Amino acid sequence: MTQGSIQQAALQLSENLLKQQLMAVTAESCTGGGIAQALTEIPGSSRWFERGYVSYSNEAKQELLGVNAETLETHGAVSEEIALEMACGAVARSRGHISVAVTGVAGPDGGTPSKPVGTVWIAWGQKLGYAEAQCFHFEGDRHAVRQQTILEAIKGLNARLQ
């Protein structure tokens, strides 16, 4: 996978959002703002990219996105439930219409038998309250996991705008 794939997906997203007059918002943990960076590389992105949250710590997830402490305690930061709460919180606390949220284990450390390195949850949310999440198991080093996450997050936004 190349940086070109990410750029191509981001360009398609910009066209889709402009056409539908929608604004996107990101909530990122394991990618550390990489999705927002990829989107804002495109000139004129302020017309369709509203804001990005980088919520790396559990405290940041709670303070910035309204993630429930009980959900973190019960399911852990890398879970479907947290990804969904992040996606819903991002769109609820912004002027965006659609959101994408990512939380995962990029490595090289932090993996467990139930959540090995490369485990990433991506969730997509809408202002109307709908959200869905998908679990991915990416291969490679930290950089590769993060790049694959960025690509799938943007591709997922595109798919939901079709």
Image (spheres, grey):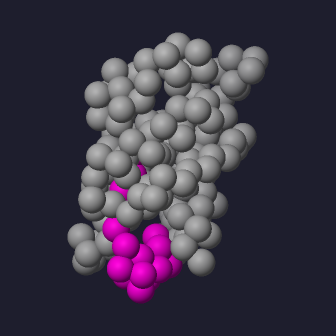
Q: Residue furthest front?
A: 128
Who's the residue at 58% across and 28% down the image? 78
**Total numbered labels placed on residues in the image:** 0
68 sits to left or right of 96: right
Q: Position of residue 80 (x, y in %)?
A: 62, 35
73 sits to left or right of 64: right
Residue 99 seen in render: yes
Q: Residue furthest bottom?
A: 19
17 sits to left or right of 151: left
The vertical placement of 38 against 81, above or below, is below
Q: What is the span of residues highlighted in magenta in the rendered image?
A: 10-28
Q: Quadrant of the C terminus?
A: bottom right
Who's the residue at 29% across and 28% down the image? 63
Q: Position of residue 68 (x, y in %)?
A: 44, 24
Picture quadrant of residue 153? bottom right
The vertical placement of 103 against 144, above or below, is above
Q: Residue furthest right?
A: 113
Name the foreground residue: 154 vs 21. 21
Q: Quadrant of the N terminus?
A: bottom right
Q: Is residue 104 magenta?
A: no
Q: Is residue 26 magenta?
A: yes
Q: Position of residue 32 (x, y in %)?
A: 39, 40
Residue 31 seen in render: no
Who's the residue at 53% across and 13% down the image? 73
Name the foreground residue: 91 vs 142. 91
Q: Position of residue 124 (x, y in %)?
A: 53, 53
Who's the residue at 66% across and 34% down the image? 119
